[in-house]
Amino acid sequence: MSAQAAPPAPEQRAPAAAPPVRSVPLGRAVAALLRKELLVELRTLESVPGMSLFAVTTYVVFHFALNRNAVEGDLAAGILWVTLLFAAILGINRLFVTDAEQGGFDGFLLAPVDRTALLLAKATTLLCYLLVLELVAVPAFGALLLGPSLGHALPDLLGVLALGDLGVVAVGTLVSALAVRTRARDLLGALLGLPLLVPVVIGAARASSPLLSYGRHGAPAARWLLTLGLYDLVFGLIVFALFDFLLDD
């Protein structure tokens, strides 16, 4: 009796190749991250209200501590920018806290997204914080402390504020990313940020001083505007070069 032939083996199919993961375009990633950051702030109100309240309270303290009805010139510029700086530190300290505490860093690193998207989204978020802060703090400063009219200073003061904000954003994003992974992040953020932001305060105060004087003694000095612009550029390049390494454990 002849042996029966073995049934033919089923055809073995090669496993299907996984579809390639496409990287999300940078613009879409930045827009999505920025939307998330702003929605979180609108729902929690953890940063901007505290920054604004701190600035207004500081002006009230200066109003009574100086025992003067009004200030102008160098004193006014110094009070304005020092107050804005300390208020900005509150927002800088909170910039990356939610991501560190709720696993946002891990989720972002697993996504097919360029890391530059997180940098741009965080920097834009901090810039939005500063703009809202100044919408509250600058009119409050004009009402509580400033002697000259704020209206005649605004066209040029807006340019100084913009340059100062860019410097705070560049330094603040770098410092916040450095400090957020440490236990003493609130203390370390201030200790690192304040010395690095001193040139911004000096340049912005010197540029603002003639705008906040009686009679307005000319436009902002070009050298101080150039100093602010150069400082913004240098720290913008530094944070762009180092940000990828700061996201790694």
Image (spheres, rainbow, N blue to C red):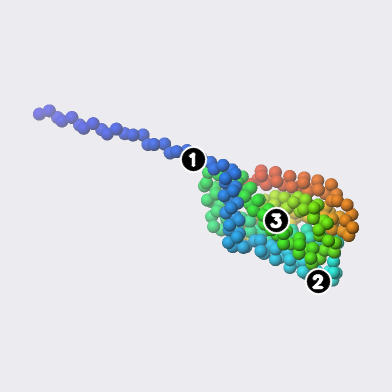
Q: Which residue is mark 2?
A: 64
Which numbered circle lies on residue 47?
Answer: none
Query: Which residue shows up at 89% across the image and 58% down it?
Result: 215
- Give left or right: position of 41 versus 231: left
Give whichever of 185, 228 is nearer the camera: 228
Instruction: Name the residue at the left extreme.
Output: 1
Is residue 200 visible in the rendered structure shown here?
no
Local secondary structure at mark 3? helix
In this image, 165 relative to 213: left or right? Answer: left
User: Amino acid under label 2?
Assistant: Phe
Kindly report which numbered mark, 3 or 2, lies closer to the viewer in this rendering.
Answer: 3
Q: Judge by depth and name the residue closer to the eye, 42 or 3.
A: 42
**Hey, what amino acid is under mark 3?**
Leu
Q: Residue at x 18, y 29 (%)?
A: 5
Q: Residue at x 67, y 64 (%)?
A: 50
What residue is shown at x 72% (from left), y 62% (from top)?
Answer: 136
